[in-house]
Image: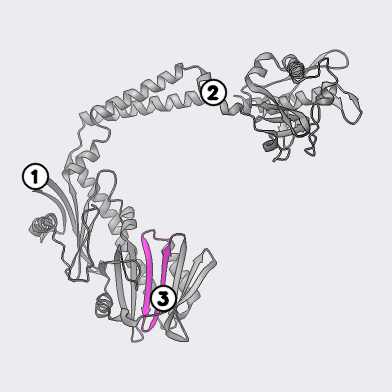
Amino acid sequence: MRKYILSIILVISGLVILIANYTSKNNPTYSESTFADQAQKFDQIFDLFTNQVKEHVFSIKNQYSDTLKIKDSISNKRTFLDLLNSNNSLNSVGLFQGDYKFVARKENSSFIFASDSLANFGVVKWQRFKGDKIISSWYESFDESIYNTPWYKELIEQSNQIKWYLRRKSKLNSPDEGQEFFYAGYSYLVNGIKTVLVFEFSKDNLFKEFNISSGKINPRLSFMNLDGKELHLNTEEEQKFGDSLQSQIIVDSLQINIARHFANFKEVPQGTFNFTYKNQIYWNSFKRLANDSGIQYYLYTVPNNQLISGNAIILGRLGLWIGLALMILGSFLLLIRKRFFYIPNRMKIPSVQEILKEEENRYLEFKSSLRWDYRQEKVNPELEKVIMKTIAAFGNTDGGMLLIGVDDDKNLLGLEKDFQTLKKTDADYYEVHLRNIMHKLMGVKYVSNYIRTEFEMVEDQKLICKIKVLSAKEPLYLKYKNKNGQVEEKFYVRSGNSSHEIESIAEINDYINSKFK
C-alpha cells in the first residue's frame, strides 16, 4: 500500500510541475505584476504592524494612568507577559515613570522582569521566569545616566507622539553588543510626572513577521520618522545601519539614488515606480502614513532580477525535466516488486538481555516451554497450542516477540526440559518440530512471510528460543480438531499483555475489515 501511495504522489507532483511549466510559458508573469503583488502584501502586513503598535501604546497608556499602577509588580508582569507572548517580533518593553522603572523582555524560552526596589530607587531587581517558576534573581545598581541619553531626551521632549528609531544595543541600558533593533517610543504625563514607554523589536524577527525576505527576494526597506530622519532596514547582508540617534552617516550610492527618484513623487500619497541604476532596474513602492503612526512614509525597493528569479523557480527546462523525472520514477515504482521495499531491520531480533528489560505487554510474551509442563512435571501437548495461539494473535494484531524458555518472572529456564521430550536433544531438531507445528496450523507461506526464529545461549549455558512475528497482511485462523474429530477455526488477537479469541463471526468480520482491508 505504501508503495502505491508513494508512486501516486510522485506522478501527481510531476504532473503538477509540468502543468505549471506549460501554463507559465503560455501565461507569462511580468515583473510589474509580481512586484505589485509583493508590495500589496507588504502594505497589508506593515499596516497591521503599525496599528498593533498604536493599540499597545494606548492600551498601556490607559492602564497606567496613575502613579501607583507601575509599582504593582504582579499586575505589571501579567500585562507585559501577555504583550510579549502576543507579538513574536517584540523583544522587550520598558516603562519609565519618574524615577521608577519596569522592564520585561524575552530571552530564549524564559522571560526577564526588572523593577525598582521600593526601598531604594537606585536599585533594580531582576527576576528570570520560565513559566510560573522563578529561575534566578539578582539586583543591579542602576546607572542614572540613561536619563541623559539622546533617545530618552527626545522621547521626553516629544509627548503624546510615537517615535521610531534604530539602535544597535541588545538591552535598553546595556553596552553596545552589535545587534540591530528597531524601537518605538512614546511619552506622556501622569499627574504631572513624565512617563516613557519603549518597545524593542528584533530586526531579524521583524523581517520574518513582515515576510519580506523569502527565497531570492531581499528587498530594501526605508522609513522617514516625524523628525525627518531616514531609517534604513536593509535585508542584504552588506547593508548595515547605524544608530539613528548618532551623527554617523553611511554612504550608500544606491540609497541616494532611491531617495533622488522618490523625490519626484512628493505630491503622491501612494504608488509604485522604477528607475535604472548601474544597468539594473529597481522597483519601488511607497506609502505616506497618518501622523499618529509616527512614520511619514515607507519606501519598499526590490531589484528587477530578483523578481525574475523568484518567478522562475519551476520554469524553463529545469521544471520540464523535474516534472518528467518525477512521473517516470513514480511509474517505475509501480512496476517494482513488493520485496524491493522489504526492510531487513523489521526481522532483526534483539538479544535476550535487551528483551528482558521490558515487561510482558501487547508486543511481548514469555513462555516457560513448548511441551514440558513444569507444574505437572510431564509432557503436555496443550502447551503447543498455547504457543501457536500467541503467535497467531501477534500476527493478527501488531506483531510481537515470544521467548520460549523464560517464565513469567523472567527466570531463565532454558529448553533442556523440552529437548528431553523429543527424539533428538538439540536446537535443530527442536526448530524442525516447532516449524512442523506452525506449517500444519498456519501454512508454509504464512510462516515464511511473517515469522522468524532464532536461538541464543545465555547464562549458565541455557538456550532460549526467540520468535519474532510481524504484523500480517492477511488474517490467520488456527485450525484444531475438537473432541469429536471435527475441524474448528479459531481467530486470536492481542489485548493488553495476553491473547484472546474472538468467537463472534460478526465481530471477526468487523475486525478483519478494519485491520486488513
Identify which residue is drawn at 47% across, 26% down.
5
Task: For marks 2 and 3, give the one nearer the viewer.
Answer: 2
The picture quadrant where one finds residue 234 is: bottom left
Helix, strand or loop at mark 2: loop
Identify which residue is drawn at 42% across, 61% down.
86
Give the number of the disc on residue 102.
3
Q: Is residue 361 above or below residue 504?
A: below
In the image, taking residue 163 as reference, residue 405 lies left or right, namely right
Identify which residue is drawn at 36% across, 25% down.
326
Give the number of the disc on residue 505.
none
Identify which residue is drawn at 43% across, 25% down.
8
Q: Mark 1 highlights which residue?
A: 279
Is there any visible trace of residue 234 in the rendered image?
Answer: yes
Residue 335 x, y percent position in the rendering: 45, 16
Is there any visible trace of residue 501 in the rendered image?
Answer: no
Per the image, is 464 magenta? no
Q: Is residue 348 above or below residue 295?
A: above
User: Tag 3: residue type?
Assistant: Phe
Q: Mark 2 highlights which residue?
A: 342
Front-most of residues 435 and 440: 435
Answer few, some or many: residues within 10 Å of disc 2's Cα (few below 14, many 20 plus, some between 14 and 19). few
Q: Do the residues bearing badges 2 and 1 touch, measured as CB atoms within 8 Å?
A: no
The picture quadrant where one finds residue 373 is: top right
What is the residue that sits farthest to the front in this orientation?
A: 460
User: Tag 2: residue type?
Assistant: Tyr
Magenta residues?
Answer: 86-109
Front-most of residues 236 and 348: 348
